[in-house]
């Protein structure tokens, strides 16, 4: 809610771009931000209409379409930047030292994920925090075909943004109709649940991966 209240739609576009294209953006709250954006879809769409000088359309579906299209485009551009970054200097990243903005084991985790799922990793990674930041970089490092990457990039971005935006928008309507209260009044709980659900697979991978490395070292 902080990002929406203080930066609005443009802040959301910037965060989605950074999280999906800049390795320093792995800590940004993409999933929860998109879900909350779905709850405030009309407000955000109206902000866009106002910025380009047209009156609010007052149409639920057009508002959702505009929001999904804009954020998906930011995600596509972000991943494209990450891909070209990987093609240019990605291999050297495996020799970088860890710092606040870069953790080598995140890069290795994304590499394992890519090896396991191939081109589909670009789509699947959209739904996994941290992995989605490094997956396009890995695609660039391994020299994935440009057209193939572009296809999975577009599909993955639309699928991720569409599911999160519509999930937030229609859950808000359903909860209000069924229980008579607004999700807007309970955002903290919603965000905590989303963060736990989306980060659980990543945390599990890190824990089990660390355990395997220790066992290997012990043997």
Image (cartoon, rainbow, N blue to C red):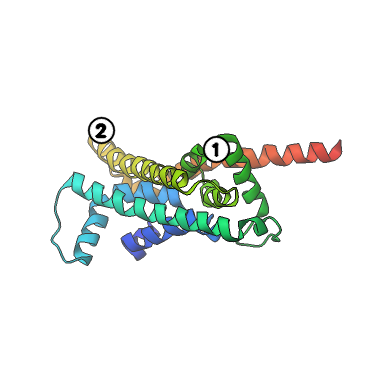
Q: State left or right for residue 140 relative to residue 92.
A: left
Seen at 22% across and 50% down, the residue is 63
Of residues 58 and 74, the one nearer the viewer is 74
Label 2 vs 1, first from the N-terminus: 1
Seen at 41% across and 43% down, the residue is 151
Of residues 5 and 184, the one nearer the viewer is 5
Seen at 23% across and 52% down, the residue is 42
Q: Is residue 40 visible?
A: no
For mark 1, what is the residue? 118
Of residues 174 and 101, the one nearer the viewer is 101
Asked whether disc 2 touches disc 1, contact meaning CB atoms under 8 Å apart, the reply is no
Residue 45 horizontal/vertical position (percent)? 24, 55
Question: So how many labels did they put on this image?
Answer: 2
Question: Which of the two marks, 2 or 1, is nearer to us in this view?
Answer: 1
Residue 139 horizontal/vertical position (percent)? 55, 48
SS at mark 1 in the image: loop
Residue 185 horizontal/vertical position (percent)? 33, 49
The Cα–Cα distance between marks 2 and 1, rounded to whole angstroms, is 42 Å
Q: Is residue 96 visible?
A: yes
Quarter of the rendering occupied by the C terminus: top right
Q: Residues within 10 Å of mark 1 (few under 14, many from 20)?
A: some
Residue 97 horizontal/vertical position (percent)? 71, 61
Q: Residues within 10 Å of mark 2 (few under 14, many from 20)?
A: few
Q: State left or right for residue 141 relative to residue 147.
A: right
For mark 2, what is the residue? 178
SS at mark 2 in the image: helix
Q: Give the answer, above or below, for where 6 lies relative to 1.
A: below
The quadrant where residue 44 appears? bottom left
């Amino acid at each position: 809610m902080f990002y929406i209240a203080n930066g609005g739609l443009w802040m959301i576009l910037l965060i989605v771009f950074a999280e999906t294209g800049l390795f320093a953006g792995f800590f940004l709250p993409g999933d929860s931000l998109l879900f909350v954006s779905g709850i405030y879809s009309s407000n955000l769409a109206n902000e866009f209409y106002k910025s380009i000088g047209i009156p609010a359309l007052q149409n639920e579906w057009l508002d959702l379409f505009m929001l999904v299209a804009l954020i998906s485009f930011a995600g596509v551009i972000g991943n494209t930047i990450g891909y070209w970054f990987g093609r240019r200097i990605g291999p050297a990243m495996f020799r970088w030292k860890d710092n606040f903005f870069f953790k080598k084991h995140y890069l290795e985790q994304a590499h394992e994920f890519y090896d396991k799922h191939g081109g589909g990793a670009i789509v699947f990674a959209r739904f996994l925090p941290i992995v989605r930041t490094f997956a396009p970089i890995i695609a660039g490092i391994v020299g994935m075909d440009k057209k193939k990457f572009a296809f999975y990039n577009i599909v993955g971005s639309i699928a991720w943004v569409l599911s999160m935006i519509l999930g937030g928008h229609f859950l808000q309507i359903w909860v209000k109709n069924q229980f008579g209260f607004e999700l807007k009044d309970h955002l903290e709980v919603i965000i905590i649940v989303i963060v736990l659900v989306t980060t659980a697979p990543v945390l599990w991978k890190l824990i089990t991966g660390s355990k395997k490395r220790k066992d290997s070292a012990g043997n």
